[in-house]
Amino acid sequence: MVTEEQVLDALRHVVDPELGLNVVDLGLIYGVQIEGSEVAVTMTLTTPGCPLHAAMPAGVEAAARSLPGVEAVRVEIVWDPPWSPERMSPDARERLG
């Protein structure tokens, strides 16, 4: 069975092309739940009008689905709590200045 850490590691390969940082370090991933071979990811985007509103969740789904043993992935976009720069990792904040 896949672990939450394995899922998060896979999601670090999903990069926001506008900011050049991955979705985990940007703080866009709010939660990962695993039930057997199914993975559910709760995430947000930097803004509701984000031009990547379809591409980012699709990238998250593909990354999680690439893990051995994962048969189904559900990605849910939420807006509450809203994303803010405080959610970013210290490394991400440093890289963006």
Image: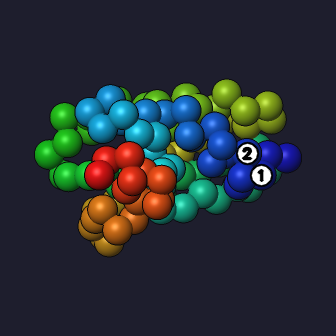
> Front-most of 91 and 75?
91
Whether residue 54 is visible, yes or no, is no
Q: x%, y% of residue 2?
A: 79, 46
| Foreground of the two, 18 or 71 | 18
**59 over 44 or under it: above or below:** above
Q: Secondary structure at mark 2?
A: helix
| Residue 33 visible here | yes
Estimate the x, y position of residue 27 in percent, counting from the top left.
43, 57
Q: Position of residue 92 (x, y in %)?
A: 42, 51
Q: Around disc 1, counting alpha carbons within 10 Å, would you say few (fewer than 14), some (14 to 19), or many (20 or more)? A: few
Outermost residue on the right side: it is: 1
Residue at the image point whose x is 39% and y is 65% from the top: 87
Circle 2 residues within 10 Å: few <14, some 14–19, many ≥20: few
Image quadrant assignment for residue 4: bottom right
Q: Could you tell me which secondary element the residue under label 1 belongs to?
A: loop
Q: Which residue is mark 2?
A: 6
Q: Which residue is mark 1?
A: 3
Residue at 36% x, 34% y: name it: 20
Q: Is residue 37 left or right of residue 39?
A: right
Give how far apart the Cα atoms at labels 1 and 2 are. 5 Å
Residue type, label 1: Thr
CB of mark 1 within 8 Å of CB of mark 2?
yes
Q: Is residue 34 above or below residue 65?
A: below
Looking at the image, residue 49 lies above or below residue 31: above
